[in-house]
Image (cartoon, coloured by chain):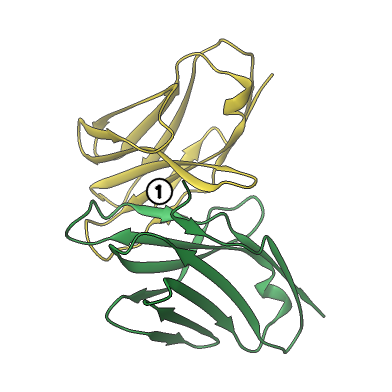
Amino acid sequence: DAGITQSPRHKVTETGTPVTLRCHQTENHRYMYWYRQDPGHGLRLIHYSYGVKDTDKGEVSDGYSVSRSKTEDFLLTLESATSSQTSVYFCAISEGQGRHGYTFGSGTRLTVV
Amino acid sequence: DQQVKQNSPSLSVQEGRISILNCDYTNSMFDYFLWYKKYPAEGPTFLISISSIKDKNEDGRFTVFLNKSAKHLSLHIVPSQPGDSAVYFCAASEGPSGTYKYIFGTGTRLKVLA
């Protein structure tokens, strides 16, 4: 989607290395989310942010940290990558709380070898 | 524990026929539901929504039905087209009593045969 971009689109990394994925939005939306998609599990929430420097954990947050120093950027860091973190990662943005759906980015395919 | 379940991993339908995708949930506090469609190598895109105060919402070929007593919703696509072939996710959220975060199901892969 034009208002939200993820980088990189693909990455291969070695076990034990730190990895940072970036989500950038131009919509000035307050809420940003990181999900991972895995076969048999659908989309699972890792972390989300409800404002600059305001973040909270999702259902699968172990091994991940996030930072949001600007409205437009939401970073997801795998502190020490493991093979179980091989996945497709999606960032999403939301206009606000309430009855707004999410707009998703195109995803980052991460492979940990 | 999966609060939103899509028990059919895949579904094949003939072009022009009806596609029915099902979704069950366990949390009675969910009050808003969405369906997303996802093509390979792309992010999910919003399709249709329904509030718990309604039992049906229609948008063109897409209709979502909600049965609150059964904690069940379904997405009907009529008529199905080859371009509808994708993975469909349902999602649910709690309203003012919750955090508005959406919980997603595991997805159903729809294949529309020409």
Q: Nearer the viewer, residue B10 or A100?
A: B10
Q: Please, which residue is most extreme toward the top here?
A: A16
Q: Position of residue A15 (x, y in %)?
A: 62, 13
Looking at the picture, does residue A66 appear above or below residue B74? above
Q: Nearer the viewer, residue A27 or A90?
A: A90
Q: Position of residue B79 (x, y in %)?
A: 65, 89
**Residue A10 appears in the rendering:** no
Q: Residue at coordinates 32% horizontally, 68% vertically from top-left?
A: B32
SS class of the residue under badge 1? Answer: strand
Q: Residue at coordinates 59% horizontally, 73% vertically from top-left?
A: B21
Q: Position of residue A34 (x, y in %)?
A: 41, 40
Q: Is residue A28 left or right of residue B90?
A: left
Letter of the green chain: B
Q: Is residue B50 left or right of residue B23?
A: left
Looking at the picture, does residue B30 appear above or below residue B40? below
Q: Which quarter of the rendering shows the C terminus of chain B? A: bottom right
Tell me if mark 1 has few (under 14), some (14-19) or many (20+) residues whose alpha carbon lies within 10 angstroms of its own: many
Q: Position of residue B64 (x, y in %)?
A: 47, 80
Q: Residue at coordinates 31% horizontally, 52% vertically from top-left?
A: B101
Looking at the picture, does residue A74 appear above or below residue B9? above
Q: Colour of chain A?
A: yellow
What residue sits right under mark 1 in the picture? Answer: A92
Q: Residue at coordinates 52% horizontally, 68% vertically from top-left?
A: B23
| Quadrant in the rendering for residue A72 | top left
Chain of the residue under the numbered disc 1 shown in the image: A
